[in-house]
Image (cartoon, rainbow, N blue to C red):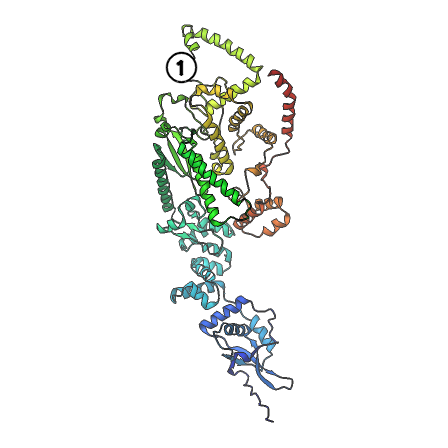
């Protein structure tokens, strides 16, 4: 039997090469928390690029009899050992790869392990940022290559490179503790040192990072802006525009730096859209505008119902038949095949196109009128048609349709209730012409008595009074300069778009516009026929028109300088009477509310809408992140700010009770 071989132990302090598969984790290692996967990945990447830069410290393993086993415990360098084992798994090296080690049998292994992890000072982050920048500038290494050599992501490298490019003056302030890392990260949104330093001089005491970012980007346009969405980032960059990106926060596409170029691209594209519309539809003019020009001062005409041509009617029937057939075939299917789903989309688009032909503008109006091409607040194009310039009006157009919910919103209509003296009134009756032989004084006397008689009789006939007031309101709302109303009530319309940016683009704004356009299409072209139109409506339709005209005059806007508490109190009673529920028309979003109030207001909203716990979880967030999170949380609730809340509808019950009390009298009058 051969004698057992004896392992020779190197002298303490000797550097030796030990095969990787002969190294073990030391039970005396002071680090009990395992290395993270990310740390091991970083070690592996560094070793693959540069080798092991620091020797491992090891001690020999002995068996129960005190004999060396040939294996060694790693006292210092366990992370490097694990990294090499990872490289073995990846087949980058063999399991017997020689590892440079220092044998230490003189020191307590637990103490030197603790010493290695405690008595050292990490590099200051600013030094790290500068070192990464030096690698990129002097060694020509890109972010991907640096990332591979240090075991981090390319995004992390780009962040460090960006921080390394911040103004040296600000970096020094960070070294000295006068700026936090979060503040330095905010400055890194731009690499313009002069701008960084100029903004720093403007800062209030201890500003948060969002304030710094806002000041640095105040002359830029966010990628979420309607102009950027309309043009598109690709078209903007192809035209030579640059985009500023924030590597440290969610910037939702960045910030466009060349605002002049962006506006030029927007104007050019809107102009092309306007030209295409004019060529396709034959309008005399089209104008492109970023926002709707509410002060245009023009009359508006609307399309009127027309019969479809025999060809279009046949095409509509064919398309509708195919749509119905496909619907019947697939009504039980949980999911439509792609080709069927696509065909449904084509049929729906064709049905919509043909149905649109049931409404048409008068060719004469198209030849004299025009359209505005406007950029919506969601970055889409909106077209408003049917506007007639004053110089293009026909001489008799004084009684023409007005019909625009926006055209007359700039103020009241004082001075429009009568035509100037001596001006012919197209609606004048033969009876008035016959009275011209009487003196003016006598005419005034007789018509005053007639007016008194009208008042007495009208006061006893509420149904006719509704016709008269509806006629008066409609004559002034839907017609320009007609002076056709006998009841001295004038609608005062308030332009809500002047108080709430983008309100006309909201679902509620579009619903109102569609409702108004629907009434405008039904108005007779000649205001002289308006009385018969109103009188011949059935009761429900007449009341609906009356309610629409009255609703157009409602003004519950609260202005800073406004002193009309009684009117606003009446608005609250009106909201109760109609059971107004603003959750049907308004939701708390970053744009509508959350991005325009303080963090305290956001937390209060979450606290009211959800819970104290939900608000507490968000309290440490930055404002932009907090607003985004609050929008998502509140979307599932019915939370409203106090200004939009409606009290219990006591007024509604009261009005209903009054209506029931009056009902027998109304029947008797009929």
Residue 55 at x, y percent in the picture:
51, 77
Question: From the viewer's perspective, is residue 500 above or below residue 397?
Answer: below
Residue 665 at x, y percent in the picture:
63, 18
Residue 301 at x, y percent in the picture:
41, 28
Q: Secondary structure at mark 1?
A: loop
User: Which residue carries the number 1 mark?
Assistant: 421
Residue 659 at least partly seen: yes
- Please state if 380 lies on the left or on the right of 1 as rendered: left
Quadrant placement of the N terminus: bottom right
Question: Observer-nearest residue: 564 or 298?
Answer: 298
Q: Residues within 10 Å of mark 1 (few under 14, many from 20)?
A: few
Residue 379 at x, y percent in the picture:
44, 43
Tell which residue pokes out farthest to the bottom in this image: 1
Quadrant placement of the C terminus: top right
Q: What residue is shown at x 61% (from left), y 31% (from top)?
A: 576
Q: What residue is shown at x 39% (from left), y 64% (from top)?
A: 137
Q: What residue is shown at x 53% (from left), y 69% (from top)?
A: 40
Question: From the viewer's perspective, is residue 338 above or below residue 129?
Answer: above
Question: Observer-nearest residue: 128 or 660?
Answer: 660
User: How many numbered dots are placed on residues in this image?
Assistant: 1
- Please state if 270 lies on the left or on the right of 409 as rendered: left
Question: From the viewer's perspective, is residue 103 above or below residue 223?
Answer: below
Corner quadrant of residue 461: top right
Corner quadrant of residue 480: top left
- Please state if 518 lies on the left or on the right of 234 as rendered: right
- Please state if 85 lies on the left or on the right of 396 as rendered: right
Question: From the viewer's perspective, is residue 649 above or below residue 225?
Answer: above
Residue 292 at least partly seen: no
């Amino acid at each position: 039997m051969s004698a057992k071989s004896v392992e020779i132990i190197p002298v303490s302090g000797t550097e030796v090469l030990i095969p990787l598969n002969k190294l073990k984790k030391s039970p005396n290692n002071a680090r009990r928390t395992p290395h993270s996967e990310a740390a091991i990945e970083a070690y592996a990447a560094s070793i693959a690029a540069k080798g092991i830069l620091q020797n491992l410290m090891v001690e020999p393993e002995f068996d129960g009899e005190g004999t060396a086993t040939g294996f060694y415990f790693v006292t210092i360098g366990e992370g490097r050992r694990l990294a090499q084992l990872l490289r073995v798994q990846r087949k980058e090296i063999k399991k017997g790869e020689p590892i440079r080690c220092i044998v230490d049998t003189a020191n307590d292994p637990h103490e030197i392990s603790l010493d290695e992890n405690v008595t050292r000072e990490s590099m200051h982050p600013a030094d790290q940022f500068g070192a990464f920048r030096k690698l990129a500038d002097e060694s020509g290494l890109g972010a991907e290559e640096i990332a591979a050599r240090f075991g981090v992501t390319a995004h992390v490298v780009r962040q460090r490179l960006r921080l390394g490019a911040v103004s040296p003056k600000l970096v020094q302030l960070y070294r000295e503790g006068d700026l936090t890392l979060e503040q330095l990260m905010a400055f890194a949104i731009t690499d313009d040192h002069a701008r960084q330093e100029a903004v720093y001089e403007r800062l209030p005491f201890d500003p948060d990072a969002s304030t710094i970012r806002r000041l640095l980007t105040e002359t830029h346009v966010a990628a979420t802006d309607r102009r950027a969405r309309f043009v598109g980032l690709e078209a903007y960059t192809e035209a030579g525009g640059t985009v500023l990106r924030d590597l440290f926060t969610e910037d939702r596409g960045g910030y466009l730096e060349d605002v002049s170029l962006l506006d030029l691209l927007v104007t050019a594209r809107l102009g092309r859209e306007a030209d295409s519309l004019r060529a396709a539809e034959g309008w005399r003019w089209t104008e492109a505008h970023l926002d709707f020009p509410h002060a245009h001062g023009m009359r508006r005409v609307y399309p009127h119902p027309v019969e479809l041509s025999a060809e279009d009617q046949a095409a509509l029937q064919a398309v509708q038949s195919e749509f119905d057939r496909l619907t019947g075939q697939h009504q039980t299917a949980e999911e439509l095949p792609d080709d069927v789903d696509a065909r449904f989309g084509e049929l729906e688009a064709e049905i919509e196109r043909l149905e649109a032909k049931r409404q048409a503008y008068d060719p004469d109006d198209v030849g004299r009128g025009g359209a505005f091409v406007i950029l919506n607040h969601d970055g889409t194009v909106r077209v408003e048609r049917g506007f007639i310039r004053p110089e293009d009006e026909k001489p008799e157009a004084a009684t023409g349709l007005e019909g625009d919910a926006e055209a007359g919103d700039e103020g009241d209509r004082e001075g429009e209730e009568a035509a100037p003296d001596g001006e012919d009134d197209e609606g004048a009756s033969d009876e008035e012409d016959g009275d011209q032989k009487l003196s003016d004084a006598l005419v005034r006397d007789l018509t005053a008595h007639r007016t008194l008689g009208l008042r007495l009789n009208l006061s006893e006939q509420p149904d006719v009074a509704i016709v008269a007031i509806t006629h008066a309101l409609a004559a002034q709302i839907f017609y320009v300069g007609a002076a056709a109303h006998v009841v001295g009530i004038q609608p005062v319309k308030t332009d809500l778009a002047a108080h709430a940016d983008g309100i006309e683009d909201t679902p509620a704004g579009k619903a109102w516009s569609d409702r108004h356009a629907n009434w405008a299409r039904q108005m007779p072209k000649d205001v002289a026929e308006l009385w018969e139109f109103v009188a011949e409506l059935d009761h429900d339709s007449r009341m609906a028109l009356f309610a629409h005209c009255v609703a157009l005059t409602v003004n519950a806007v609260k202005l800073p300088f406004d002193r009309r508490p009684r009117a606003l109190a009446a608005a609250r009673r009106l909201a109760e009477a109609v059971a107004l529920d603003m959750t049907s028309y308004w939701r708390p979003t970053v744009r509508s509310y959350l991005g325009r109030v303080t963090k305290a207001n956001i937390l209060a909203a979450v606290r009211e809408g959800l819970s104290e716990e939900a608000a507490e979880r968000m309290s440490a967030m930055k404002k932009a992140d907090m607003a985004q999170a609050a929008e998502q949380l509140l979307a599932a609730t019915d939370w409203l700010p106090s200004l939009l809340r409606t009290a219990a509808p006591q007024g509604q019950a009261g009005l209903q009770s009054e209506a029931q009390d009056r009902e027998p009298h109304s029947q008797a009058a009929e």
